[in-house]
Structure formats: C-alpha cells, structure tokens
Amino acid sequence: MHRKIPFFCLLLLLLPSACLRAHASASLLLEEPFGAFGALNPTGHAAIYLDRVCAETPTLLRRCGPGESGAVISRYHRVGGYDWLAIPLLPYLYAVQYASDVPHYADAKLEARLRNRYREAHLLAYVPDQPGVEMPGGEWTQLIGASYDRKIYGYELDTTPEQDNRFIQTFNSAHNRAHFNLLFRNCANFSANVIDFYFPRSVRRNFLVDAGIMTPKQVAYRFVRYGRRHQALHPKTFVIPQVPGTIRRSRNVNGVIESLIKTKPYVLPLALLHPYFTGTLVAAYFGDRRFQPDSTAQVFDPALPPAAVLAEQTVPLPAAQAGWLSETTDTQASSGESE
C-alpha cells in the first residue's frame, strides 16, 4: 500500500489556489530534463500554469469555477496532431483527479498505471487505445504525471481577469494544429509567446548564449527579470519536488551553450576539432553569468497544519543573492543583447 499525501496542501502552498486568492496569476513552470533524451538535450521543458483559466477539454479553455485550480498549458510533439494542450493542474503533476489519490512514493509501474488510468478516463479522444497493447506508446505521457519524472521550478506574476478573458478568446478561436520544431517552435517558444501575450516584450532570445534558440531557462531568466522590474505584479517563486521513489532523479536545467560545455560527448570532440570556437563558447557562457533556478525556494512540508499553509501560500522571489541579475545587466553589451 502506497502512502498518500494527507491533504492538498502542496499545491495550496506552492501554487496560487483559485479558491484562496481573489486575483489571478500566470506561472512559468521550468521543468528539469530526465531520461536518455534529457541527457543528450538537457534544456528541460517549459509550460504555463494559469490559476484562473481551466480546461473544459484539452483544447477548449474557459474561466475557472469556484474551487477549481486552473490548468497547465504547453506545446507538445505528436499528441493528437495539436499544437497545444491544456491539462488540469493536479492531473498534470500527478496523473490523478483527486488529492487523496496522490502517492507519497512511486515507481515506474505505478507511474504507468496512473497515467494509463487517467488516459482511459479523460484522454481517449486524444490518445486512443492501440490494438494488442494495454498502454499506447508515444509522447502523450508528458501531458500527465510530470512530478514523477521531474523537479519543477515555478515563477509567478499577477494577471487580471481581463487578460485571462482575452487569452481564452484568442486561443479558443485560433487554429490549433501541430507546429512543433525542436529548434524554433518548441515548448519554450510557446511559453514565451504566452508570457508575451500577458506581458508584452518581456521575453526575448539570446543570440550569443543560446544561439538564438529559445530555451526554457532563457524564458525563466527573462520572466524573473521582468518580475523584478515590475514589483506591482508581486513576483514569487516556488519549487515542486520530484515524487520520491525508484524513478531516476531528473537533472539540472541547462541552456544551449551551457549544455555543450557541460556535456562531455559534445564538448570533447568539439574542443579537439575547433579549439578556438570552443573557447569562445566557454567565454560566452561564463561572461553571461548564467541564471540558475532558486535553490532556496520554500518547499512544502507535509507535516505543516492547514492553517500554516493558508498563512503563507507562496514565497517572494529572492534578491539577486548570487549577483546574476546585476551582473547580467553589466554584461549585456558584450553579449549582443538589447533591452
């Protein structure tokens, strides 16, 4: 028998609950890479959590009702032929519909069983059964149960009901067909577009450090930077731990050049064949003072009583304790960026 988290405090503490907060918010979810693909491409995944926008279906958005906690929206590859899909918060994190069913410990078999059970109940129109197999293959598994595979960092800014209404109307009426491209139309590009929809001109690419490719880490850096310059939006940060268990732990999130420098199968041959070019990449990486997810963000303790959760739901973004904010400002001229 797997132990269960006793109550839904985790999401009340770490993510803004619709039933507890009058205003709306948008959060960027910066998700660590995992598995074999994550080892070769350690840029991770990006998604957007909107606490007052809910999913009537994965392709139809609406305003949330009382007690609903919003939806996570992202771009996916080869899932029903759609460009983006929206999943309610709890299933997105744990592949269950009710808080009482969230496991305290998970292995690969439990993860697969929970995902397939939720698929059969709610996603058959998007991920149909396949003959001869109990659970179909494909990348649909990224839609639900993310917290079994990854640690997730979140960065939140306030929004308004008017912004949410406009977002719902725009996305419901737009053509939603697959446009995924790993380099130029990936999950980070989609998240950047959603953030710019709410906060115009807040996210842009870095042509030197990330070779012009939008990465989840670059979106997070720009989003946090924008929040620090607009304190009226009440910027906050949180972390959702990977569920304990035998599933391999996720890895740190990297940018493009950061991945090249830190991944031996890439950097060693490159250094031998093109030593001067490799030296330029290293200089660009260290000169940019790369943004790192906040390791001091508060993590929920299941032993806390509900009253403590209601008293402090989220934690403010930390000051520029590592110097990344001010130092990056000083080095932008050399990195070729413009504000």
Image: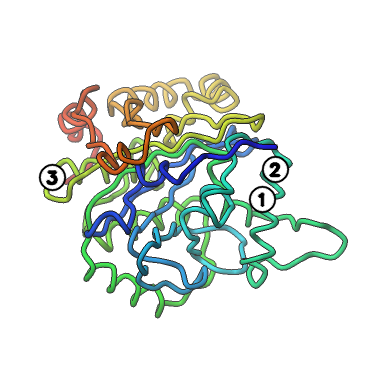
Please tell me how crowded label 1 is: few (under 14), some (14-19), or many (20+) other residues with Cα within 10 Å: some
Circles 1 and 3: CB atoms closer than 8 Å: no
- Quadrant in which the N terminus is drawn: top right
Label of residue 231 in the image: 3
Mark number displayed over residue 114: 1
Which residue bears the numbered disc 2? 110
Q: Can residue 160 be seen?
A: yes
Residue at 58% x, 29% y is 249
Point 66% across, 65% down: residue: 121
> What secondary structure is marked by label 2?
helix
Nearest the viewer among 239 and 280 is 239
Element under disc 1: helix
Q: Position of residue 179 (x, y in %)?
A: 51, 65
Q: Residues within 10 Å of mark 2 (few under 14, many from 20)?
A: some
Labels 3 and 2: the sequence-earlier one: 2
Side of 300 where 260 appears, left or right = right
